[in-house]
Amino acid sequence: MRHFEKRHDRTPGYRKTCIDCSGRRDQSARNLKYRMAHPEKQKVRDSRPERKKQRAVYSAIWRKNNPEKVAAYKIMKAALKTGALRREPCFICGENAHAHHSHYSMPLDVTWLCSLHHLQAHALGHRLTRNYD
């Protein structure tokens, strides 16, 4: 239990995540907050040649390690092209949207989120689904 912090709220016991995982999650949230507050700095950083090369290498590794996600994306893109799936605005704010898969085993079941809300959904670990009832 030495790898888990005691809870600081009124609930007795220990936190669900270890100290290392909690620290990584907190760092990711801080990074996201900074990137959203300084988009001009992120744009300059991303336009550097070494960053583009680094992103290409990372993307190739990511595609190799995530075949289910790549397959879901390809199926979704094909459905958009044939008209079987229709692009919609972000269901939160109404801006132009990206497809967010809550479950990659259902490639055509997507939630449409703008780039900001899509980034937030992944950074916060939310599985957003649209209720069609």
Image (cartoon, rainbow, N blue to C red):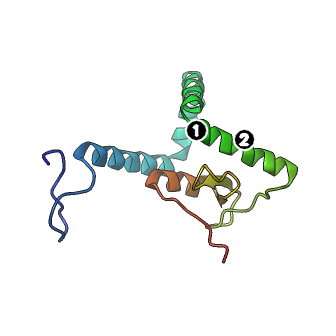
* Count of numbered tags: 2
Neighbours of disc 1 within 10 Å: few (<14), some (14-19), many (20+) = few
Front-lying residue, 112 or 16: 16
Q: Given the image, on which type of amino acid does mark 1 rest?
A: Lys
Residue 10 placement: quadrant = bottom left
Q: CA distance from mark 2 to mark 1?
A: 27 Å
Neighbours of disc 2 within 10 Å: few (<14), some (14-19), many (20+) = few
Classify the position of the C terminus by image quarter.
bottom right
Task: Please report the residue visible at 60 percent of the width from the left and 35 percent of the height from the top.
Answer: 67
Q: Earlier in the sequence, mark 2 or mark 1?
A: 1
Q: Secondary structure at mark 2?
A: helix
* Residue receiving disc 2: 74
Task: Please report the residue visible at 19 percent of the width from the left and 67 percent of the height from the top.
Answer: 9
Q: Is 58 on the left or on the right of 12, as rendered?
A: right
Mark 2 vs mark 1, foreground winner is 2
* Residue receiving disc 1: 43
Residue 101 drawn at (x, y percent):
61, 53
Front-lying residue, 129 or 48: 129
Residue 7 drawn at (x, y percent):
18, 61
Up the image or down, 70 lies above or below 14; here it is above
Residue 112 placement: quadrant = bottom right
Q: Given the image, on which type of amino acid does mark 2 rest?
A: Lys
Up the image or down, 41 lies above or below 91; here it is above
Residue 78 drawn at (x, y percent):
79, 45
Q: Is 65 on the left or on the right of 9, as rendered?
A: right
Q: Is 108 on the left or on the right of 42, as rendered?
A: right
Extreme-right residue of the structure: 82
Residue 51 placement: quadrant = top right
Front-lying residue, 18 or 32: 18
